[in-house]
Amino acid sequence: YGEAARLILAESGDAVAHLGSVADYVEVEQRFERAVDGALGDLLQHVVVRTHEDAAAGLAFVRERAAGRVGFLVVGDASPAEAVRALVTEIDIAETREEARAMALETGRTAATLDGDVFRGAHRVEGGARGEARSILTTKREIKELRERAETDDATLGRLREEAGNLEVAIAAAESAISSLQGELHR
């Protein structure tokens, strides 16, 4: 995230009533991450708010802190997920540049390749990689996967601790039985 969006999302507290970022509401299969990231671009960093007043409070917040530019998605009465879904449904995804170009020329809509090249209507083409190493969607997916893995590892750790406890009880019982037998042998 850019500095202004990060500032609002992490530090604004009650000063800016927000519902997270657009990226928080985007779930795509890994193979479509580059296409959706390229097509949505900076929209992924937009802060989701209910009203224009909330957006105005956010703009004032970042201006007071000279944090740079920030965008907002004003959802009104719609659910944030519905509002973001409307953005994503405006994107056509194609396997190749030629297919994406043809789609964009024919429909005037945004078409993206799986590699993240984006055709916006007849006259705009975007491509390449962002300056940051990972896209927001890739980072979000990796965090989700790491959380799931941590939960699985925690469950495994709990099971192993229980098994170790059971083994300690069995060892203690075996040591007691051995002591008992040794005592009988010495009599």
Image (cartoon, rainbow, N blue to C red):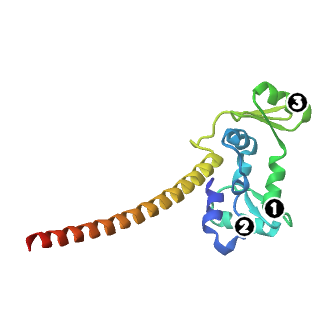
Label number found at residue 99: none
160 horizontally vs 78: left or right:
left
User: In the picture provided, is 121 more to the left or to the right than 166?
Assistant: right
Residue 55 rendering spot, x and y as whole percentages: 77, 65
Of pointers 3 and 2, the one earlier in the residue sequence: 2
Spatial separation of the CA atoms under disc 3 and disc 2: 36 Å
Between the C-alphas of marks 1 and 2, the distance is 10 Å
**Residue at 82% across, 57% down:** 83
Tell me if residue 177 comes above or below residue 48 in the rendering.
below
Labelled disc at residue 105 = 3
Residue receiving disc 2: 18
**Closest to the observer, 151 or 74:** 151
Q: Amino acid at mark 3?
A: Leu
x, y percent for residue 145: 58, 51
**What amino acid type should be assigned to the residue bearing mark 2?**
His
Q: Is residue 122 visible?
A: no
List the residue tagged with mark 1. 74
Mark 3 is surrounded, within 10 Å at the Cα level, by few (under 14), some (14 to 19) or many (20 or more) other residues, namely some
Q: Bin the neighbour count of mark 1 within 10 Å (Cα to Cα): few under 14, some 14-19, many 20 and up.
A: many
Which of 57/72 is in front? 72
Assess disc 2: are there few (<14), some (14-19) or many (≥20) residues with their C-alpha within 10 Å of its C-alpha: many
Disc 3 on helix, strand or loop?
helix
Which amino acid lies under the numbered mark 1 shown in the image of this protein? Val
Residue 167 image point, x, y percent: 34, 64
Mark 1 or mark 2, earlier in chain: 2
Q: Say what secondary structure mark 1 lies in.
A: strand
User: Element at badge 2?
Assistant: loop
Gap between marks 3 and 1 measured at Cα: 29 Å
- Dot 3 and dot 1 residues touching (CB under 8 Å): no
Quadrant for residue 19, please give it.
bottom right
Which residue is located at x 70 percent, y 70 percent? 16
